[in-house]
Amino acid sequence: MIKNDMVRRDGEAQLLTELAKVCEPIHVASDLARSFITAVRERDMNMLTAWTESASQVTASKEMNGFAQGLVRNWSEVKAAIQLPWSNGRTEGHVNRLKLIKRKMFGRAKLDLLKIRVMASGP
């Protein structure tokens, strides 16, 4: 049975459970996705290594295969992201906020108005 560890809308968990019962690829993909999330959240390299091996199997979808192979190709970066305590999430959030403000203003003004809007919105 599929464990509902994520917030889902009404009926989504039940639909996923029913689909997993009748469609083996959905069952495999669902299990792989759940175990990947667990490995990353727990920052467990052994679990992630085992995940890449199981996601590279023939029974997994070609998308999971490709994702696992991409992780293996960039293993040193993946290892650093899992093991090191630093994150660039805050920086990426600010960049995303700036891009959103800039997109809203497209074609309306130049740098002076952008500066005012950025300073007004705050971090």
Image (cartoon, rainbow, N blue to C red):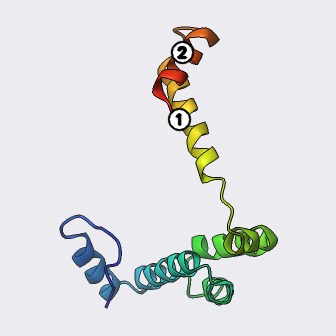
Residue 49 against residue 69 in the figure, above or below = below
According to the image, label 1 marks what residue? 97
According to the image, label 2 marks what residue? 116
Splitting the image into 4 quarters, where does residue 109 fall?
top right
The kind of residue on which mark 2 rests is Ile
Q: Residue at x 37, y 83 (%)?
A: 23
Badge 1 marks a residue whose secondary structure is: helix
Residue 95 against residue 110 in the figure, above or below = below
Splitting the image into 4 quarters, where does residue 81 fall?
bottom right
Badge 2 marks a residue whose secondary structure is: helix
Viewer-proximal residue among 87 and 74:
87
Label 1 close to label 2 by CB (< 8 Å): no
Viewer-proximal residue among 102 and 42:
42
Measured from the top left, where is residue 67 in percent x and y? 64, 70
Q: Residue at x 51, y 9 (%)?
A: 108
Measured from the top left, where is residue 61 in percent x and y? 55, 77
Residue 110 can be seen in this image: no
Residue 21 against residue 86 in the figure, above or below = below
Structural crowding at the residue carrying mark 2, measured as other residues with C-alpha within 10 Å and reported as few (<14), some (14–19) or many (≥20): few
The kind of residue on which mark 1 rests is Arg
For the residues marked 1 and 2, what is the alpha-carbon distance in whole angstroms?
Answer: 14 Å
Which of disc 2 and disc 1 is earlier in sequence?
1
Viewed as shown, does residue 28 lie left or right of 50? left
Q: Residue at x 63, y 12 (%)?
A: 111
The residue mark sitting in front, 1 or 2, is 2
Measured from the top left, where is residue 37 in percent x and y? 51, 75
